[in-house]
């Protein structure tokens, strides 16, 4: 696809959440009309922050964010805002417009067809599944007919059919799209350029090519920079040894030592800030609470078919070591079932009294965003001690400085890692996991899968990521569509 003029430009942008700790430093790049751009980088590098500056929610400390006059921006957010949950589908879409649209029902039908979603207009957003909400968030952005479409982890909660439909749509979409996602196959299917954010150097580099080609370019650049710095370091060490020798001599030798010192300074200045590949999470273990009796009893399940609840009697008892996978298409009621189980509000599914429960919510609604990361970790421990909390936090790339910050400043990926750090400290008898790969860097997912496969407690999971599911070896499956 031929690109047009520049529609978005960052010019020497610096941004920080915490004083004197820049997240971005002198970031400069441009995005052209009709470009399909991926933003990639480590957790906490500032990907979602860039989106917030494009939408105007955040302002840079220095520099400027320039959008072509008249260009409209819309974002498909990762998570449905809480204030929208009790609105009907129709009222939710009405929020996309400043003035009332008399043909709103027609517009809603057309845009729901684009995202392959069929729900009654009067249905409450709260009553939709995670996958249905993901499609609704995309439709909300599209109904605004934006010139720049921002997609933040758009494949989270989508089943295979939903991802296929979204991919096909983006391949034919004729306006500018900027995407944040950890789904590499999805990204590679339509990306033509990449913005790479580096959490260590606070720089943004721009590359042309599909996702996999850019990953190879970055790896090659890292290797070139490492080799250059290694050569310069060797020269520096060699000159320092000569300086030490010549400095004790007299006359011309002392002048030579002075010249060598200048060359050392020049070599130091010529070193480059090397990009660093994402660190991969090291293996970890979630020790379970000792529990010899039944952990969960399920006697009745409710599935949503043709937008109506259908109940079914079952007899499922889960004990230590058993792992239940809950399956079915988007909208069938999987997340609703486990949410009711975890809250104690589902009379047909009961967790035994005294069982410690670790619950990974797909939208992180179980986290108190006003707490610090340290407080969140300490809250799940019977006896919390600083050394253990900071050590476990560091294992999940949550530095001591980050643990002191409120969770609202964390990236979605950091919130996900915080949940796994909580599980390690909590030692739950039961893990309830609702899309536990959401927001997690793809490098970490095999490590998390191994930890969950080795977990000896009881587990109930909903996940659409088949490769991840296959690694865990579930003992039971509950298909709500049957």
Image (tube, rainbow, N blue to C red):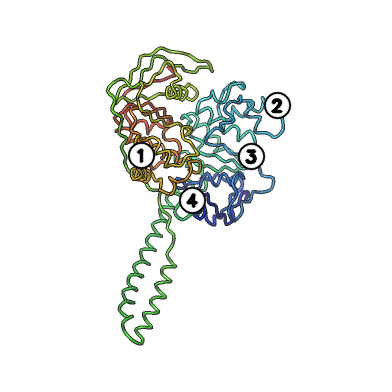
Mark toward the viewer: 1 or 3? 1
> Disc 2 designates what residue?
103
Q: Secondary structure at mark 1?
A: loop
Of 72 and 57, the residue lying toward us: 57
**Mark 1 or mark 4: whose residue is earlier in sequence:** 4
Q: Are marks 3 and 4 in contact (CB under 8 Å)?
A: no
**Mark 1 or mark 2: whose residue is earlier in sequence:** 2
Determine which of the numbered discs, if any, sits on residue 146 in the image. Answer: 3
Category of crowding for the residue at label 4, using alpha-carbon neighbours closer than 10 angstroms: few (below 14), some (14–19), many (at least 20): many
Q: Secondary structure at mark 3?
A: loop
Of 139 and 49, the residue lying toward us: 49
Disc 3 versus disc 4: distance between alpha carbons? 25 Å
Disc 1 versus disc 3: distance between alpha carbons? 49 Å
> Disc 1 designates what residue?
384
Horizontal arrangement in the rendering, residue 472 relative to residue 24 (left or right):
left
**Mark 4 or mark 2: whose residue is earlier in sequence:** 2
**Mark 3 or mark 4: whose residue is earlier in sequence:** 3
Q: Secondary structure at mark 4?
A: strand
Q: Position of residue 439 (x, y in %)?
A: 45, 38
- Asked whether the viewer can see residue 177, the reply is yes
């Amino acid at each position: 696809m031929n690109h047009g003029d520049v529609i978005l430009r960052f010019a020497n942008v610096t941004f920080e959440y915490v004083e004197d700790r820049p997240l971005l430093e002198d970031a400069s790049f441009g995005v052209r009309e009709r470009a399909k751009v991926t933003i990639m980088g480590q957790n906490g590098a500032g990907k979602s922050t860039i989106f917030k500056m494009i939408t105007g929610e955040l302002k840079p400390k220095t520099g400027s964010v320039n959008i072509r006059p008249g260009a409209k921006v819309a974002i498909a957010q990762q998570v449905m805002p809480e204030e929208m949950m009790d609105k009907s589908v129709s009222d939710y879409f009405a929020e996309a417009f400043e003035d009332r649209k008399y043909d709103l029902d027609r517009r809603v039908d057309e845009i729901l067809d684009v995202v392959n979603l069929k729900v009654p207009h009067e249905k409450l957003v709260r009553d939709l599944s995670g996958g249905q909400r993901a499609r609704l968030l995309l439709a909300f952005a599209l109904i605004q007919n934006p010139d720049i479409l921002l997609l933040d982890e758009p494949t989270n909660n989508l089943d295979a059919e939903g991802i296929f439909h979204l991919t096909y749509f983006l391949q034919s979409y004729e306006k500018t799209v900027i995407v944040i996602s950890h789904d590499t196959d999805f990204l590679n299917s339509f990306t033509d350029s990449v913005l790479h954010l580096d959490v260590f150097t606070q720089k943004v580099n721009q590359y042309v090519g599909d996702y996999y080609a850019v990953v190879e370019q970055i790896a090659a650049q890292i290797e070139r920079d490492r080799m250059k710095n290694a050569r310069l370091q060797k020269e520096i060490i060699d000159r320092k040894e000569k300086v030490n020798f010549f400095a004790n001599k007299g006359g011309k030798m002392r002048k030579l030592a002075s010249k060598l010192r200048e060359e050392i300074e020049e070599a130091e200045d010529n070193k480059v800030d090397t990009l660093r590949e994402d660190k991969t999470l090291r293996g970890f273990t979630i020790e379970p609470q000792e529990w010899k009796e039944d952990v969960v009893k399920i006697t009745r399940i409710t599935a949503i078919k043709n937008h109506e609840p259908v109940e079914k009697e079952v007899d499922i008892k889960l004990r230590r070591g058993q792992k239940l996978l809950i399956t079915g298409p988007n909208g069938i009621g999987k997340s609703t079932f486990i949410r009711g189980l975890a809250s104690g509000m589902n009379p047909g599914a009961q967790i035994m009294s005294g069982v410690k429960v670790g619950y990974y919510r797909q939208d992180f609604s179980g986290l108190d965003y006003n707490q610090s990361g340290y407080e969140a970790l300490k809250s799940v421990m019977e006896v919390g001690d600083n050394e253990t909390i900071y050590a476990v936090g560091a294992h999940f790339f949550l530095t001591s400085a980050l643990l002191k910050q409120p969770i609202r400043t964390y990236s979605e990926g950091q919130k996900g890692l915080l949940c796994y750090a909580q599980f390690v400290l909590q030692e739950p008898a039961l893990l309830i996991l609702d899309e536990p790969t959401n927001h997690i860097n793809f490098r970490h997912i095999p490590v998390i899968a191994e930890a969950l496969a080795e977990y000896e407690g009881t587990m109930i999971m909903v996940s659409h990521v088949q490769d991840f599911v296959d690694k865990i070896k579930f003992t039971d499956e509950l298909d709500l569509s049957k």
